[in-house]
């Protein structure tokens, strides 16, 4: 039974219909300034696009990246017991301890960009159910995880970088993508933390068994999330929604994080307009997913770590885009001759 204070999945789903559009006026004002900056038109390439995208979603002609937040959600998965990861399930909690202690890659990268890093640990001692046997989450557990992710979003941040930690979650993400976008299990499955050939074959089997046990996952995106996702994935879906409602730009990390956000794309193809994908993960399903979403990642650094590492790197590029956009002189200010 769902508590009166806790929203149901239906109530959360209804929020998609309330998603605001970007601020076109702020975008136009930013574009007008950009056209006057001391560079050949378009010569800063995607840095120019990034500045305009930030301006539209922040609703200001001078986009800011002084206050970025990083949110990493951690959860455990019942399917971890099926030998689908190169690492044991205990690593999820051990890495959370490492994040809190400051010893992980995401800590160093967050310090490098000056981001506020938050770790959200989600009932690590209670993994989701094994989705080869039925739904991973009950309705109210999934709704609660989504609401938890939504609550991580506070006003006052310039952008939100999202990421996850959860042993076995690349298998969950693969099953989710198969339910959302179709194809074959092998199209969405990869080596994750580094499984061998036998591990890869087990991942394919587990994804196929998951879809066989949860045929309803193909019918509706939130059902796919509930049946095949995990707590950290549901929290990411919720955080992406809350950012959209607050018009906070989002930077998505790798395959697992993008898969969680993709649930919303299947409900509304403009639902992820406030999101950019930081990098293309080595996980082969990520390229396929990016194509399905029509998103071009910013970076391709052969990374496959997760924990928001790629997303935080991309925050650095957003800061560079803002520095140029706000700090450069115009042709008139600098006394540089324009195009003939
Ligand atoms: O998101 C990605 O692109 C990604 C690719 C490979 C591994 N990961 C991370 O590794 C864990 C999942 O890998 P696995 O092999 O346990 O499914 C999880 O903690 C993720 O953060 C993440
Ligand atoms: C060590 C380790 C660190 C991680 N960070 C995110 N996912 C991870 C998976 C493992 C195995």
Image (spheres, rainbow, N blue to C red):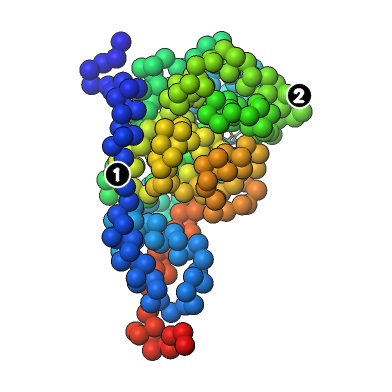
- The numbered mark at residue 154 is none
For marks 2 and 1, give the CA distance. 46 Å
Outermost residue on the right side: it is 197
Q: Is residue 229 left or right of residue 16?
A: right
Q: Assess disc 1: are there few (<14), some (14-19) or many (≥20) residues with their C-alpha within 10 Å of its C-alpha.
A: some
Q: Which mark is residue 198?
A: 2
Q: Quadrant of ligand 1?
A: top right
Q: Residue at x 64, y 19 (%)?
A: 208
* Cβ at disc 2 under 8 Å from ligand 1: no
- Quadrant position of residue 318: bottom left
Where's residue 26, x and y in %? 29, 60
Circle nearer the viewer, 2 or 1? 1
The quadrant the N terminus occupies is: top left
Tell me whether the residue at label 2 lies in contact with that at label 1, contact meaning CB atoms closer than 8 angstroms. Answer: no
**Secondary structure under the numbered disc 2 in the rendered image:** helix
In the rendered image, residue 327, in percent from the top left (x then y), is placed at 37, 72
127 or 213, which is in the foreground?
Answer: 213
Is 284 drawn above or below residue 113 in the view shown?
Answer: above
Q: Is residue 144 left or right of residue 252?
A: left
Quick check: 155 above or below 64?
above
Q: Nearer the viewer, residue 179 or 83?
A: 179
The residue sitting at 40% across, 76% down in the picture is 37
Q: Residue at x 76, y 24 (%)?
A: 198
């Amino acid at each position: 039974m769902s508590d009166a204070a806790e929203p149901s999945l239906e109530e959360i789903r209804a929020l998609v219909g309330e998603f605001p559009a970007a601020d076109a006026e702020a975008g136009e004002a930013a574009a007008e300034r950009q056209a006057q900056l001391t560079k050949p038109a378009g010569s800063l390439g995607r840095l120019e696009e990034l500045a305009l995208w930030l301006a539209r979603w922040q609703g200001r002609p001078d986009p800011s990246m002084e206050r970025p937040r990083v949110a990493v959600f951690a959860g455990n998965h019942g399917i971890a017991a099926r030998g689908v990861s190169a690492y044991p399930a205990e690593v999820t909690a051990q890495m959370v301890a490492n994040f809190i202690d400051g010893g992980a890659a995401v800590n160093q990268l967050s310090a490098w960009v000056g981001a506020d890093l938050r770790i959200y640990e989600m009932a690590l001692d209670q993994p989701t159910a094994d989705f080869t046997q039925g739904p991973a989450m009950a309705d109210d557990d999934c709704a609660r995880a989504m609401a938890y992710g939504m609550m991580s979003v506070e006003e006052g941040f310039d952008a939100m970088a999202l990421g996850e930690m959860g042993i076995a979650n690349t298998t969950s993400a693969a099953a989710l993508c198969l339910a959302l976008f179709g194809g074959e299990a092998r199209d969405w499955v990869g080596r994750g933390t580094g499984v061998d050939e036998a591990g890869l074959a087990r991942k394919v089997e587990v994804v196929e068994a998951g879809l066989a046990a949860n045929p309803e996952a193909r019918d509706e995106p939130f059902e796919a999330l509930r049946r095949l996702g995990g707590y950290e994935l549901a929290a990411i879906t919720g955080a992406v929604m809350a950012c959209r409602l607050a018009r906070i730009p989002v930077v998505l990390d790798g395959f697992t994080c993008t898969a969680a956000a993709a649930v919303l794309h299947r409900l509304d193809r403009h639902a992820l307009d406030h999101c950019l994908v930081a990098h293309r993960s080595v996980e082969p399903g990520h390229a396929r997913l990016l194509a399905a979403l029509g998103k071009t990642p910013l970076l391709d650094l052969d990374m496959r770590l997760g924990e928001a590492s790629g997303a935080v790197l991309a925050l650095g590029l957003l800061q560079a885009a803002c520095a140029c956009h706000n700090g450069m002189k115009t042709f008139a200010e600098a006394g540089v001759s324009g195009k003939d």
